[in-house]
């Protein structure tokens, strides 16, 4: 008789959750998810969001600065890393939108990054490429390998 591989069973299951994270009494982010599964008793504990999540980041005035959503995510508590996957969308306070299929959020260093294809839509252009590094509020970012047409503005002082 064949033995099947062990299956991790969650220590906690919750549905339709809203989690608020605060620092010194100020809400820093709000996380909403239809389902959450915590695996806390494993050697490397993690939390899974099998039906996706939505996260709102707040500034010190309590205003939403950035929104992140994904159809699936897994958070590794021991490393302070969350991997968001499938239809990942990040929108910053200027309305700039990042779309990709995989994004890693380094909570400890407050950065987001990916090596996957990215599309960034701004008020005036659409940027594409492979790989991205950004602060977690998606206000300062670098596309590692830009692709497509990039519009350059002429310097008014040059002839």
Image (spheres, rainbow, N blue to C red):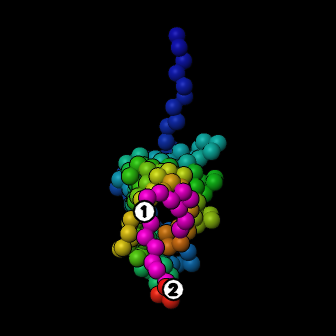
Give the structural element (helix, strand or loop) at label 2.
loop
Labels 1 and 2: the sequence-earlier one: 1
| Residue ID for mark 2 | 158
In the rendered picture of this protein, how many numbered marks are placed on residues?
Answer: 2
Q: Residue furthest top?
A: 1
One can see residue 122 in this view:
yes
* Spatial CA span between label 1 and label 2: 22 Å
Q: Which mark is residue 149?
A: 1
Residue contact between numbered discs 1 and 2, judged by CB atoms under 8 Å: no
Quarter occupied by residue 53: bottom left
One can see residue 84 in this view:
no
Residues shaded magenta? 141-155
- The one nearer the camera, 152 or 45, is 152
Q: Position of residue 105 (x, y in %)?
A: 54, 59
Q: Residue furthest bottom?
A: 157
Report the mark closest to the observer, 1 or 2: 2
Q: Position of residue 29 (x, y in %)?
A: 47, 69
The answer to whether residue 144 is above or below residue 12 is below
């Amino acid at each position: 008789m064949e033995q099947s591989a062990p299956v991790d069973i969650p220590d906690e299951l919750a549905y339709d959750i809203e989690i608020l994270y605060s620092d010194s009494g100020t809400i820093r982010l709000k996380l909403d998810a239809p389902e959450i599964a915590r695996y806390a008793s494993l050697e490397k504990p993690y939390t899974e969001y099998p039906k996706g999540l939505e996260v709102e980041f707040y500034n010190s005035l309590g205003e939403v600065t950035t929104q992140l959503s994904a159809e699936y995510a897994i958070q590794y508590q021991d490393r302070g890393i969350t991997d968001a996957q499938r239809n990942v969308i990040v929108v910053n306070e200027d309305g700039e939108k990042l779309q990709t299929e995989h994004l890693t959020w380094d909570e400890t260093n407050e950065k987001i990054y990916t090596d996957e294809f990215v599309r960034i839509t701004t008020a005036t252009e659409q940027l594409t490429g492979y790989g991205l590094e950004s602060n977690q509020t998606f206000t300062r970012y670098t596309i590692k390998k830009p692709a497509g047409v990039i519009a350059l503005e002429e310097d008014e002082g040059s002839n």
